[in-house]
Image: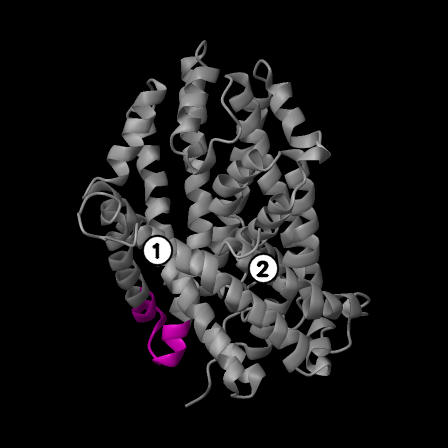
Amino acid sequence: MAKLERAKFGSRLGVILATAGSAVGLGNVWRFPYMTGENGGAVFIMIYILCVLLLGIPCMISEFIIGRHGRANTARAFTKMAGGSAWSAIGYMGVLTGFLITGYYAVVSGWCLQYIWASLIGHMQGSPEYFQTYFVQLSSDPVKPVLWTCIILGITYLIIEHGVRDGIERASKLMMPTLFLLLLIIVGASCMLPNADKGIEFLFKPDFSKITGDVFLAALGQAFYSMSIAMGCLCTYASYFSKNTNITQSAAEIGIIDAVVAILAGLMIFPAAFSVGVSPDSGPSLIFITLPNVFTQAFATMPAVGYVICLLFFVLLSLAALTSLMSLHEVSTAFFQEELVITRKKAALIVTVSTAVIGAFCSLSLGAVDGMSFFGKTLFDWFDFVTGQIFLPIVGFLTCVFIGWAVPHKMVRDEFTNWGTLRGRFFHLYIFLVKYVCPLAILFIFLHQLGLLK
C-alpha cells in the first residue's frame, strides 16, 4: 500500500492564522486583562512583552522544530527526535495535557455561547447583583452548561473532521480576521467613553514602584499560558508545516500577534471599566460578571449600542475560545488517528465524545451535583490546577532541556535554518535562551505556582 502524504497547510497565511489562532484564545481575552489589572497595569504589560520575546518565542520555536522534524503527532514526533529514548515520554505527556485541557476548556467556551444567547434574548441587562446571580446560577445549572459544552465540541468536531486545509486552515482564515475586526470595533467604542483616558493611562503609563517578584513571575506565567506552549498544539500544527516554512519568522509573527491581541483586549476592557468606576483588579470574574455590567452602565444613555457591544463582545470571546479549542482537539485527534491507524473522522469522534464526558463532569462539579469536590477543590478546579500548574510547566521545562541539551545541535540547526537555506543569525542566541534562560524561568514559575517560591 502506498504511503499517504502527510497533510500540509496550503499557504503561509494559513500557517500564521491557524497557529496564531491556537495561541490567541481565552488566555488573551479573558486571563490577560484580569492579570494586568491585578499586577499593576503598564508595568505588567512591559514585563509580559519581554517574557514573550525571551521565553515564549524560543519555546514556540522548539516545539516547531520537534513537530516539523517528526511530521507526526506530538507523541510520535518526540519519539522520532529522541530516537526512541525515555525523552519520548515528554510527547505523550504533552498529548495528555492537551486532551485534559480540552475537556474543562470546553466548559468555559460553552459559557461564552450561553452568553451570546442571553444577549440575543435580552437577558444581559440588570444590576451588578443580577449579573453575579446569573453567572452563579448558570455555572451550577445541571443542564445548560453541559449542553453548551457539547455544542461547542460538536462545532469543533465539524471543523476538525474536514482535515487541515479544508477544516482548520479554512476556519482560521474566516475566524481570525473576524476576531480582529470585532476587537477593533469594541476598542473604538470603549475608548470613546467618558473618562476612558484613565483606563488607557493605566495600560500605558508604567508605575515602576509596582514591580515585584510576584508581578514578574505572573507575567512569565501569562506568556507561557497565552501562547499555548507545552499543550502539544504548536508541535502538532508544526507537523503540517512545509519544509520551506521559516519557523523563526513564523514564531516571531505569532508572538507579535499574541501580544497585540492581549493589549487590544486590555484597551477593550479597561477604558470601559474606568468609565463607570469599576476596579481594574476584578479578577477571574471580570469577563462573565463584571463586564456585562460595565457595558450596560457605560452605554446607559445609548442602550441599543450597549446591547450590540455586549453581544459582539461575547461573539469575540467565543471565536477566541473556538480557535484554541480547535488546536487542542487536533492534538488528540492526530494522536488517535496515527497511533490507532483509524480515519480522521473516527479519531475526531473519539476525542469529541470523551472530552464531552470530561467536560460534563467538570461542569457538574461546580454545584449541580454534590460530592464532586476533593480536598477543597471541585473536579473543574483540579483539572485546571493539574494541567495548568503542574503538567504545563513540567512539559515546557523538559522540552527546553531536551532541545538544549539532549538533541544534537546540528539537527536543531538544520531545522532552524531550513537545512542551510536561511542564514540563522539568531541560532546561537536561541540555543542560549533554550538551554539556560527558558528552563530557569519555567522552573521559577513552577515553584511560584506551588507556593514554594515567594
**Which one is in front in this view, the residue at disc 2 or the one at disc 1?**
1
Which residue is at a point 55% across and 33% down the rendered structure image?
37
Circle 2: element type: helix
| Kind of residue indicated by mark 1 | Trp
Range of residues picked out in magenta: 335-348
In the figure, 167 relative to 189: above or below?
below
Residue occupying the point 63% across, 53% down:
254
Q: Is residue 53 part of the magenta span, yes or no?
A: no
Give the main secondary structure, helix, strand or loop, of the magenta stretch. helix
Amino acid type for the residue under numbered disc 2? Val
* Residue to which mark 2 is pinned: 15
Dividing the picture into quadrants, the one containing residue 334 is bottom left
Position of residue 349 in the picture relative to residue 284 (left or right): left
Q: In this rendering, would 306 be left or right of 123?
A: right
Residue displayed at 47% across by 69% down = 94
Above or below residue 388? Residue 179 is above
